[in-house]
Amino acid sequence: YEQAKALIFSTYGEPKDVLSLHGHSISPAHSDNLTLRFLASPINPADINQVQGVYPSKPSFTRALGTAAPAAVAGNEGVAEVLSAGSGAKTVAKGDWVIAKAPGFGTWRTHAQTPEAAVMRIDDKAGLTALQVGTVGVNPCTAYRMLTDYVDVRDGGWFVQNGANSGVGRAAIQLGHLWGLKSINVVRARPEGVEGLARELKDLGADVVVTDEELQDKGFAERVKEWTNGGREKVRLGLNCVGGKPATAMARVLSPEAHMVTYGAMSKQPVMLPAGLLIFKNIHFDGFWVSKWAERNPAEKKRTVEDVLSLTRKGLFKDAPVLEVPWSFETNQEVLVEAVQGTLEGFRKGKGVFVF
Ligand code: NDP
């Protein structure tokens, strides 16, 4: 039997109000079940939204962990090591690393028991850290698909994105650069200025880094013209993480027939589109949700994950900065819940990741 702990919730609300640390034990794995020990699980914005009850993918609330009220384990992404496998498990064996196939797995826990069908084996973990594998399935996959599924990367040219400092944004900068795309990257202005941040993003391969304030300046279109060789190089794609004014301003930068893909709503403001962009420039507005995409394209998800991991192994893809939150058997609830709640603040040095 394994002694396990999990961050669970029984009702929706603010993480600090509804999350609690629950101890339980896990019986030995039988049939096609696996006993997992988590290694690294990130705290993604969507996880918070899920705890708040405002995310479309809802976890299932059960008494499986011996709780008084039906409860769900929070967290949707992470990497785990297989501690033991039932005799019916065919694709996964002791010692393997696995990631969840679908959201709702509940990854903020030390251990889990799961049917093998719920997880995807990492075929080659050599040279990779748990942090790298534990954060590959959501942000890099999202950036990867958005850069490749809406335009033909072989056409080259530019893409523009807001939220460029996010995990997705940093992944898009690197992948785009590797694939020969140039990028205009919009970040939020901050009190200390953005020089340091701009340098960091340029080191990853960003061509231009500007603030949301510069983006909304009257002369911005002229600057874009300069960067793009008088407009001869097309801006074929926009990636919208933020919504509100930075989204509208970004749409104005796009070349005719371009796609703007919305994947986040960090400002919580609606996306407003000038009709002229639809009528006269025929800009296409799309939305992307990696969960739905992975559900529809499981084989492609595996290939995408493996492709990013192989770039990581070669040193061509750098993981986004993280704030490690160590989680041992002794770690108390307050520390863990505080790490989750703290994610809601902006201007952070990195994404919180539970490291077990
Ligand atoms: P991170 O946790 O890595 O970073 C959060 C980013 O959001 C930071 O760059 C931060 O900017 C920015 N931000 C925070 N608050 C605001 C605000 N009020 N206005 C503008 N920007 C803000 O984020 P992820 O990369 O994990 O996720 C980014 C977004 O993408 C989230 O909305 C997430 O839900 C979404 N997402 C969607 C996916 C999909 O499939 N549709 C998949 C993955 C993510 P700063 O650097 O200035 O602090």
Image (cartoon, helix red, strand yellow):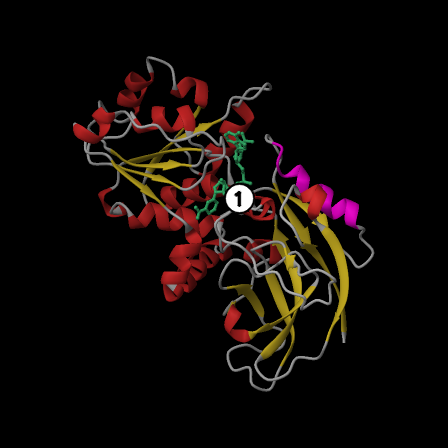
Q: Amino acid at mark 1?
A: Val
**Who's the residue at 58% across and 68% down the image?**
97
Residue farthest to the bottom, as pictured: 87
Q: Residue furthest left?
A: 280
Residue 61 appears at what percent x and percent y?
Answer: 61, 60
User: Where residue 178 sits: x, y (%)?
Assistant: 37, 46
Q: Residue 245 sits in which quadrant?
A: top left
Q: In front: 39, or 7?
A: 7
**How many marks can you see?**
1
Residue occupying the far right of the picture: 330
Q: Which residue is mark 1?
A: 54
* Residue 338 part of the magenta-drawn span: yes
Task: Give me the residue at 64% from left, 83% from top.
Answer: 30
- 301 is within the stretch colored magenta: no
In the foreground, 170 or 87: 87
The stretch of residues the image draws in magenta is 333-345
Residue nearest the observer in this picture, 205 or 234: 234
Classify 200 as above or below 139. Answer: above
Task: Say whether mark 1 is within 8 Å of ligand 1.
Answer: no
User: Horizontal and vertical percent for residue 153?
Assistant: 27, 46
